[in-house]
Amino acid sequence: MRPSPSKMVAILLLAAFASPAAWAASAASMLPLDLMNSGKPIAEPVNNAAFIPGPDAVAAPAFVSAPTIRRACAHAPRAPDDSL
């Protein structure tokens, strides 16, 4: 027996709203500003949810740039001379 399309939609919506961002702690509690500015290492990695933009976040302006490309030589490094 196949589930009805409405049940499948309900399951997909439930899975979407049950994302970690919905129940995660605030970024300030996971990565306090003084700790971030100190540059000191911590015992465990910071949860990725600490870097999710908040509800007051706005889009960044478009990145506009002209890359500068210089010529480079592609060759293997020389092996040390062990004959001496």
Image (cartoon, rainbow, N blue to C red):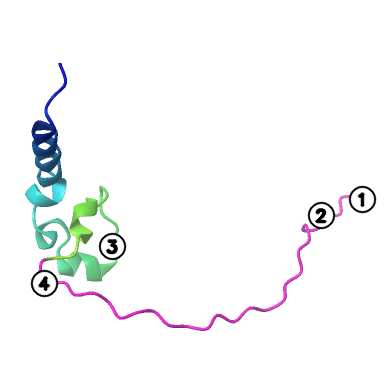
Residue type at tag 4? Asp
Q: CA distance from mark 2 to mark 1?
A: 9 Å
Q: Residue at x 13, y 65 (%)?
A: 54
Residue type at tag 3? Lys
Query: Looking at the image, is mark 3 or mark 2 earlier in the sequence?
Result: 3
Task: Indicate the quadrant containing the N terminus: top left, top right, bottom left or bottom right.
Answer: top left
Residue pointed to by mark 1: 83
Q: Secondary structure at mark 3?
A: loop
Residue 56 marker? 4
Query: Looking at the image, is mark 4 or mark 3 earlier in the sequence?
Result: 3
Q: Secondary structure at mark 2?
A: loop
Using a 10 Å C-alpha cutoff, classify the residue at mark 1 as few (fewer than 14 neighbours), some (14 to 19) or many (20 or more): few
**Mark 4 or mark 1: which is in front?**
4
Residue 21 vertical placement versus 28 (above, below): above
Query: Looking at the image, is mark 4 or mark 1 earlier in the sequence?
Result: 4
Q: Position of residue 10 (x, y in %)?
A: 8, 37
Q: CA distance from mark 3 to mark 1?
A: 46 Å
Query: Looking at the image, is mark 3 or mark 1 earlier in the sequence?
Result: 3
Residue pointed to by mark 2: 80
